[in-house]
Amino acid sequence: MSDGMVRTMTLLADSDMNGQGFAVEDITTGVHASGFGQVGDGRSFSFHVEHQALVVEVYRPRLRGPVPQAEDVVATATRKLTDVDLCDERSMTAVVRDAVADAQPVPRNSR
């Protein structure tokens, strides 16, 4: 049940991966929206709302464990949420898809 601020989580089946190689596997909408998914090239991503912005992290392929670590982040993106309906799954999915596509590589310190 939704109180207008937070919507329940939705899980997508593996077959929901579209032809573009992008799928949101889990999404919670609302003021504290968050979720995760897969990109067609084997990478996974997560997203969350932080200070009125969407923060997306794209992880390297073939993660070793179920919880990505800081060194697993290969790209990030941030989007303002001024024109996004946080309570609408389609709106959130679209902004996440665009952010994943535009994510910039994370600079690494050479050793």
Image (spheres, helix red, strand yellow):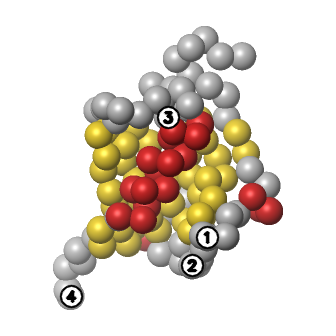
Q: Quadrant of residue 35?
A: top right
Look at the numbered discs 2 and 4 and tell me whether their residues touch, using CB distance below 8 Å: no
CA distance for labels 4 and 3: 37 Å
* Element type at mark 2: loop
* Amino acid at pointer 2: Asp
Quadrant holding the C terminus: bottom left
Residue located beneath label 2 in the image: 41
Q: Any mark on residue 3, and which?
A: none
Name which of mark 1 and mark 4 comes first in the sequence.
1
**Image height of 47 relative to 89, above or below:** below
Name which of mark 2 and mark 4 comes first in the sequence.
2
* Amino acid at pointer 1: Gly
Furthest-top residue in view?
A: 3
Q: Residue 19 location, x and y as percent? A: 67, 70
Q: Any mark on residue 33, and which?
A: 3
Q: Any mark on residue 111, and which?
A: 4
Tell me: 7 left or right of 100.
Answer: right
- Is residue 34 visible to us here? no
